[in-house]
Image: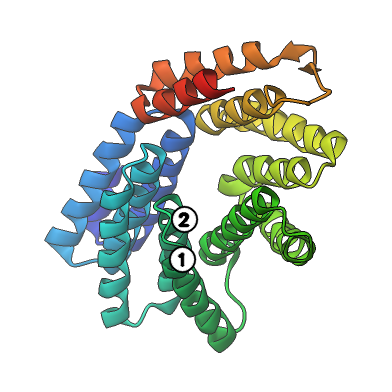
Amino acid sequence: MVALNLRYGEYWHVSTYIVFYGYLNIERGAFDEAAVIIDKLSEIWATYGNENATEYRYSLKIILLILFRKFYDALKEANNGIAFHRQTGRELVMIYYLGYKAAIQINLNDISGAQESLLEAKELVSKIGFVPPIYISGYLKGQFLLDLYLLERSILSHGHKEKLKIIKKAKKSGKRALKNSFKYAFDRTEILRLIGLYYWLIGSHARATRFWRHSIKIAERFGADVQRAKTYMEIGKRLSEEGNRYGKLMGITADEYLKKSKNLFEKFGMERELEELDKILTYR
């Protein structure tokens, strides 16, 4: 079908069709199939000069590299994508990439860089007005990740006044990201997990567990096994914390959640996630 439509010149439909197939493969852990789609999108761009194809190629590659914790490679792809679309004037795409760039920078502890990326994205959102859910999703998620990072840091530093301010900010950004995820399902499992983390950090553990349950159920319904594994790991990590009064969630212990996540990460060959899991097991 792809080959036939390319012969007819339906480049937009082909590129759009296969990028969403790529998203599905990433969610399900079929990374080899996602890599084939990335190659196909590169081929469509090289052969026909279709800008959608190169936009989607960057999107899939950035997400894959983030999942495999190859943050410097992901940052390079994000910068290349932003530079390309700065030239083409596709500002909606730039908002999407800037959000993911901020998420990458947070993982690299470049907080000032993440703030700059999000500020640029915010200015574009203000300029454009309405931004479709798929394009604003990266920005909203990036902002929420930054607020969660700052919240966790304020808790560790015991800064009460700063903590209250960040709690309010994180609640607002989390609410916006959650609302958008109901219009863009690819993010929903992850955002539900992050909302759960927000409530866990502020001490509302009952609410946190409610959102984590929802994250797991949505992941099971969508077949989003990669994000389900990450939710298992987050739950196992938090249930393992000293002083936690929850021994189990849905009748499952912290050790069992960590084992569930390990089994899925091994299945998908996610070595960096397994390394992160080992750190949790070592330092808990």
From this viewpoint, is residue 11 visible? no
Q: Residues within 10 Å of mark 1 (few under 14, many from 20)?
A: many
Residue 282 x/y as whole percent: 50, 19
Residue type at numbered disc 1: Ala
Q: For residue 206, what is the image quadrant?
A: top right
Residue identified by numbered label 1:
114
Label 2 residue SS: helix
Instruction: Please state, as top left, top right, bottom left or bottom right, where the N terminus lies in the image.
Output: top left
Q: Residue furthest front?
A: 158
Q: Residue furthest left?
A: 47
Residue identified by numbered label 2:
106
Q: Residue at x 33, y 53 (%)?
A: 14
Residue 265 x/y as whole percent: 44, 21
Residue 134 x/y as whole percent: 54, 60
Q: Are marks 2 and 1 in contact (CB under 8 Å)?
A: yes
Q: Which of 63/34 is in front?
A: 63
Left or right of 46, for residue 70: right
Q: Is residue 29 above or below residue 9?
A: above
Label 1 residue SS: helix
Instruction: Please state, as top left, top right, bottom left or bottom right, where the C terminus lies in the image.
Output: top right
Residue type at numbered disc 2: Ile
From this viewpoint, is residue 265 visible? yes
Q: Which of 265/146 is in front?
A: 146
Q: For residue 51, what is the image quadrant?
A: bottom left
Q: Residue at x 67, y 22 (%)?
A: 240
Residue 67 x/y as whole percent: 41, 39
Name the disc covering residue 18, or none: none
